[in-house]
């Protein structure tokens, strides 16, 4: 199956079902006759900019990141409030803990904005580290990010 068709199927599935894990997504895809590996689904999730959100019942599910009309900074601010679990500063590092599967979104948004207090970012599944030149810049970065976090 072509990637575009598989990604369309993924979009339809996450719009119709509360899918919280890659395993669940693979199950629904298989029901639709789509054979894919976990690695392929993981790449699709990143390419499609899927994020995990909390349902009204408190469960986690995949959703399309849909802030297309916002500036990059507005997207960052919105996303910080939705996915950040914890914010910590250690010397010249600012560490964001997110809902699993969302740290790379924060990292990409941070990289797209030219913050003078930021040297770079490192993002994994649920942790994004913002590197500053010194503690003073890290304090400014922490204060900026803290304004937008609901946690």
Image: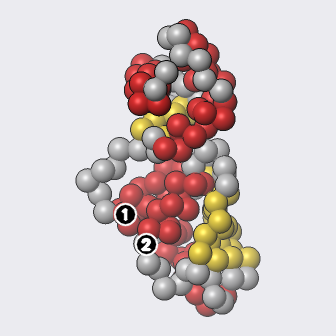
Contact (Cβ within 8 Å) of mark 1 with mark 2: yes
> Which residue is outermost to the right?
90
Residue 72 tag number: 1
Viewer-side residue, 42 vs 3: 3
Q: Residue furthest left?
A: 69
Q: Residue at x 53, y 10 (%)?
A: 33
x, y percent for residue 39: 66, 35
Residue under the point 53% across and 37% down: 44
Q: Is 89 left, or right, of 10 in this rendering? A: right
What numbered label is drawn on residue 113? 2
Q: Earlier in the sequence, mark 1 or mark 2?
A: 1
Image x and y of residue 27, in percent? 61, 16
Query: Circle 1 sits in a helix, a strand or a loop, which is it?
Result: helix
Instruction: List x then y, in percent, for residue 145.
Output: 52, 69
In the rendered view, would you say 117 is above or below 60? Answer: below
Residue 137, placed above or below residue 1: below
Q: Residue at x 57, y 49 (%)?
A: 102
> Where is residue 8, by image quadrant?
top left
- Cα distance in 3D space between marks 1 and 2: 7 Å
Q: Residue 20 sits in which quadrant?
A: top right
In depth, the one of 77 and 66 nearer the eye is 66
Which residue is painted at 60% across and 54% down in the image? 103
Q: Quadrant of the C terminus?
A: bottom right
Tell whether 45 sits left or right of 130.
left
The crowd level at tag 1 (other Cα within 10 Å; few <14, some 14-19, many 20+) is some
For label 2, the SS is loop
Whether residue 102 is visible:
yes
């Amino acid at each position: 199956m072509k990637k575009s068709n598989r990604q369309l199927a993924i979009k339809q599935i996450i719009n119709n079902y509360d899918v919280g894990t890659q395993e669940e997504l693979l199950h629904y895809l298989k029901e639709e006759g789509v054979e894919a590996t976990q690695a392929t689904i993981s790449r699709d999730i990143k390419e499609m900019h899927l994020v995990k959100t909390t349902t009204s019942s408190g469960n986690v599910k995949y959703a399309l990141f849909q802030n297309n009309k916002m500036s990059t900074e507005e997207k960052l601010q919105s996303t910080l409030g939705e996915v950040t679990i914890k914010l910590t500063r250690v010397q010249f590092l600012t560490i964001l803990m997110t809902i699993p599967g969302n740290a790379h979104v924060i990292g990409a948004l941070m990289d797209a904005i030219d913050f003078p207090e930021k040297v770079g970012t490192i993002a994994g599944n649920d942790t994004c580290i913002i590197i500053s030149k010194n503690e003073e810049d890290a304090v400014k970065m922490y204060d900026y990010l803290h304004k937008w976090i609901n946690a």
